[in-house]
Image (cartoon, helix red, strand yellow):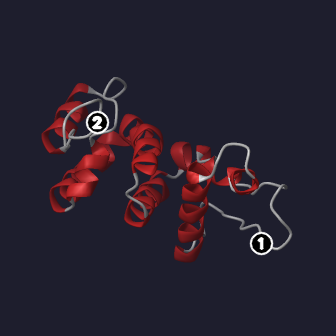
Amino acid sequence: MLRSSSHLPVTRPQPRFTLVQMTHEELLALADAWITYWLAPIGSQEREATAWATDLYEFEHEDPETLWQLILTIHSKDHSPRIQEVLSAGPFETLLDKYGEKFIERIEVQARQDPPFAKLLGGVWLNSMTNSISLRVQSVWDRRGWDGIPE
């Protein structure tokens, strides 16, 4: 279960998420808090208050379907370079590394239909994926803007 930080201000409720019963509203709240954390200045109250949202361990190891939905939700809410960098190198890369075979068809479809998603995919590192997944990722990703590749 994701746990919220005890450092949250009293005026903000601390959402509780369960792997089995996460509602759409809870998923949106988690995505918002995750984005807020990564955009907030280091050491800020806002960042401290949303640190709980970065603990995705149980999704990454026990609930990849919710992790996939979270990736899509975060992507739909924020295309800023900072969020794209962290989302690509973090949850998205983990999903591909651990569950590539299960999700690659959905990822390919999404990348073909959604150019910003293909660009998000361009930020993942291939070194931990199987060769077959890596080749399929490379067939649909957009690397422009990553690692000095011109837009």
How far apart marks 1 and 2 lie (CA) works out to 37 Å
- The image quadrant of residue 101 is top left
Say whether residue 100 is left or right of residue 55. Answer: left
Say whether residue 100 is left or right of residue 65. Answer: left
What is the quadrant of the C terminus in the image?
Answer: top left
Where residue 27 appears, as percent x and y from the top left, is 54, 67
Can residue 147 be seen in the rendering of this structure? yes
What is the quadrant of the N terminus in the image?
Answer: bottom right
Q: Can you say whether 85 is above or below 27 in the image? A: above
Q: Can you say whether 99 is above or below 75 in the image? A: above
Q: Nearer the viewer, residue 42 or 56?
A: 42
Say whether residue 150 is left or right of residue 23. Answer: left
Where residue 123 appears, as percent x and y from the top left, is 32, 38
In the drawing, what numbered circle is on residue 146? Answer: 2
Mark 2 lies on a secondary structure that is loop
Near mark 2 (Cα within 10 A), the count class, few <14, some 14-19 or many ≥20, is some
Residue under the point 59% across and 48% down: 56
Question: Earlier along the polypeptide chain: callout 1 or callout 2?
Answer: 1
Residue under the point 69% across and 52% down: 47
Where residue 62 appears, as percent x and y from the top left, is 55, 47
- The residue beneath circle 1 is 13
Amino acid identity at mark 2: Trp
Mark 1 lies on a secondary structure that is loop
Residue under the point 52% across and 44% down: 60
Q: Can you say whether 34 is above or below 123 in the image? A: below
Q: How many marks?
A: 2
Say whether residue 116 is left or right of residue 64. Answer: left
* Outermost residue, top side: 127
Where residue 130 appears, as percent x and y from the top left, is 29, 27
